[in-house]
Image (spheres, rainbow, N blue to C red):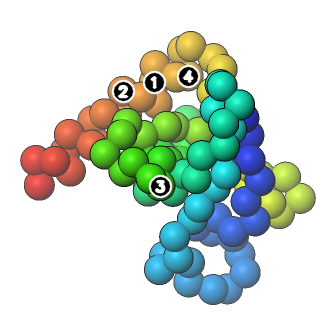
Amino acid sequence: MSEHNHEHGDNCGCGHDHEHEEHVFLVTDEEGQEREMVMVYTFESEEQVYAVLLDRNDLESDGVIFRIEEEDDEAYLVGIEDDAEWERVTKIYEEIAQSENEA
């Protein structure tokens, strides 16, 4: 999936409470189709922030994890290309999801 720009993250610094807002992104998949994705969760690992997005039209599908990078006070979603990084963050997310399912 390709990267996408979004100006308001959870800590965008604008002084507004964004927790009530639905963060929707248009993400282009490997086949070139645009999908509306909703940010449902963020977490940190090794001083990086990651976002979990779900397909807005299929919330039961598996989530997709992106790294959040900031540049010039704007946040960008970036696909994870490194296999070791991918393994690390998917393991963390699976542990988070499992603990939430048990609660």
- Identity of the residue furthest to the right in this view: 72
Rendered residue at 58%/53% (across/down) = 36
Residue 95 picture location, percent across and down? 27, 35
The amino acid type found where label 1 is placed reads Arg
Query: Could one spot residue 59 in this view of the protein?
Result: yes
**Amino acid type, mark 2:** Lys
Task: Check whether the beta carbons of the residues at disc 3 and disc 2 lie within 8 A of each other.
Answer: no
Q: Which residue is mark 2?
A: 91
Q: Amino acid at mark 3?
A: Arg
Circle 3 or circle 2, nearest the eye: 3
Q: Residue at x 45, y 48 (%)?
A: 54
Q: Quadrant of the N terminus?
A: top right
Tag 3 residue: 56
Q: What's the CA distance linking mark 1 and mark 4? A: 5 Å
User: Mark 1 Cα within 10 Å, few/some/many (few <14, many 20+)?
Assistant: few
Disc 1 designates what residue?
A: 88
Residue 22 spot, x, y in % from top left: 52, 70
At horizontal 53% and vertical 76% (from top left) the residue drawn is 21
Mark 1 and mark 4 in contact? Answer it, CB < 8 Å.
yes
